[in-house]
Amino acid sequence: MRHRYQRMLQGAIALAAFLVFWQIASITGIFGHMKPEYSQLLLPTPKSVVTAIFEMARTGYLWDHLSVSIARVVVGFLISAIIGVPLGIAMALSPLLNNMMEPFVRIFSPIPGVAWVPLAILWFGLGDQAAIFIIAIGSIFPILLGTIQGVRSVDRRLIEAAKIMGATQRKIVLRVLLPSLIPYLITAFRIGFGFAWRVVIAAEMVGVPKGVGYMLTIGRSTGHTEVTIVTMLLLGALMYAVEEFVFHPLCADGEAYASI
Amino acid sequence: MHVEISNASKTYLGDRAGLSIHALNDVSLNVNAGEFLCLLGPSGCGKSTILRLLAGLEFPDKGLVQIDGTSVIHPRSGVGMVFQDFALFPWLTVEENIGFGLRLRGEEKGTVRDTVSRWIDLVGLRGFASMLPRQLSGGMKQRVAIARALALSPEVLLMDEPFGSLDSFTRMEMQEELIRLREQQSFSSVFVTHDIEEAVYLADRVVVMTPRPGAIKTIVSVPLPHRRDRTGKQFTEIRNYLLSLYERASSHLREAAR
């Protein structure tokens, strides 16, 4: 226990030193390289960032934008899961479908999701639809490929055991295939979710209105750099929370589903 | 239930190297109701193939596999199977695994619960009902797998080296357990093993098989009452006789290789 407190104390001291360094840098004009008024624009003080967090939370500005992005990610991600999982299962089970789909997967999956931004804006205009489209396209491939791999690695003996006990094709899919897929789906969703966030931020930065990406740019272009920094911290906290409170416990559960 | 294999042959075509494996050559065999049959032989002698044919997981290229006079073309009810590496559903608890087949059949919840609980007692897993397979030892996993198969009250139980991955003490314990279970519920058994002593301990008849191509060399009856004494005179004689059959076979192979 002593070691643990010692480690935390060492970390806290380093963090405090960093904040002091940051504070000095922003009030001295990056150590005298420029006028102090100017440097606060490039590097707002820690205090102004903290003030901005409370201010933005109080006025509801923070939640307004954050909720827009979350809604876009959730909808886009759901669409790609609803299409990706069944399509992946079907492709893994049907050689015909797999052969037909494979060229498309090979052509489109290496294209970074962000590259779809211009086309999406052209097709759907500057709004939610464009953002959702890009998120769905950006996260569908990890989900699709993860599902295919999951189905292909299903333990053959489990399927045979179920068959001998009288399982129909449908029951095999429901009772054996889907549960076996769970660990693969958790991994696929985790990767897909990371993609979805990156893509939505990019889309909102280049013109889709509102959302966290919009906050990042608006902070820069209106001279409120602290808004940009707050948004970055927020994104970090959000990804950390999702990883820690959603995927980490899921993975622990998922291990129970892995083969014995 | 009468099980009959007539003149069955099976070849597995081309792996990547283009090699075909002649797994079974003209095998004929029948299993009488209530009989315990052991298929004995080294790996590659086609004993697991016979089991897969009986299970309806595969079909012979030539010949017939029949149960009660009809060809086995898909897995059929009344036939259960136990695998060497257990094949338990890792996401289901002990009781859910045992109840899997009953629930597939659409049995009432109450019936499933009662049957499962009876089998948990019969295989001595009381207290482990809500554990997951990975929390159990090898012997316990195989008890679950046996209970899962027997809960469906099969007339024929196929077992593919079920104790092959267990240590020899656990294996002896499981062999006795199996004999005990057969006293509770009657079913014919086709039991694949490469362990001569195991075959003599369990079987009414031992089917002696030889590899490349898989074929039946001879069938040896074991006319001893259960529980058999592993160190007894007759037991040892039969074991030594079986051993001598393989000694001769392998010396033939050595000569042929020369």
Image (cartoon, coloured by chain):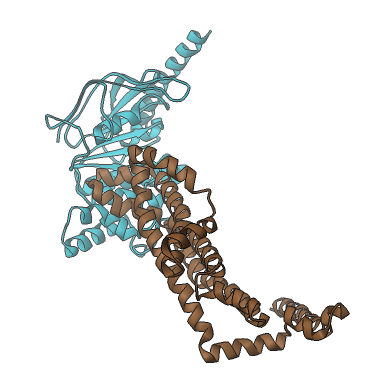
Chain colours: A brown, B cyan
Task: Give the image location of residue B238, x and y in percent.
Answer: 35, 26
Vertically, is B221 above or below A10?
above
Q: Residue at x 51, y 59 (%)?
A: A118
Q: Position of residue B2 (x, y in %)?
A: 15, 32
Q: Quadrant of residue A55?
A: bottom right
Visible in this render: residue B136? no
Residue nearer the viewer, B4 or B104: B104
What is the tally of numbered marks visible in this picture? 0
Residue positioned 33% across, 37% down in the render: A96
Residue A86 seen from this side: yes
Q: Quadrant of the N terminus of chain A?
A: bottom right
Left or right of B168 on screen, residue A9: right
A46 in relation to B236, above or below: below
Q: Residue furthest left?
A: B69
Image quadrant where residue B136 sits: bottom left
Spot occupied by residue B137 in the image (x, y as percentages of width and height): 44, 53
- Against A197, is B164 above or below? above
Q: Position of residue A150 (x, y in %)?
A: 42, 49
Question: Which residue is farthest right?
Answer: A32
Give the side of residue B28 with respect to residue A185, left or right.
left
Residue A82 or B24: which is nearer the viewer? A82
User: Which of the pair B50/A167 is nearer the observer?
Assistant: A167
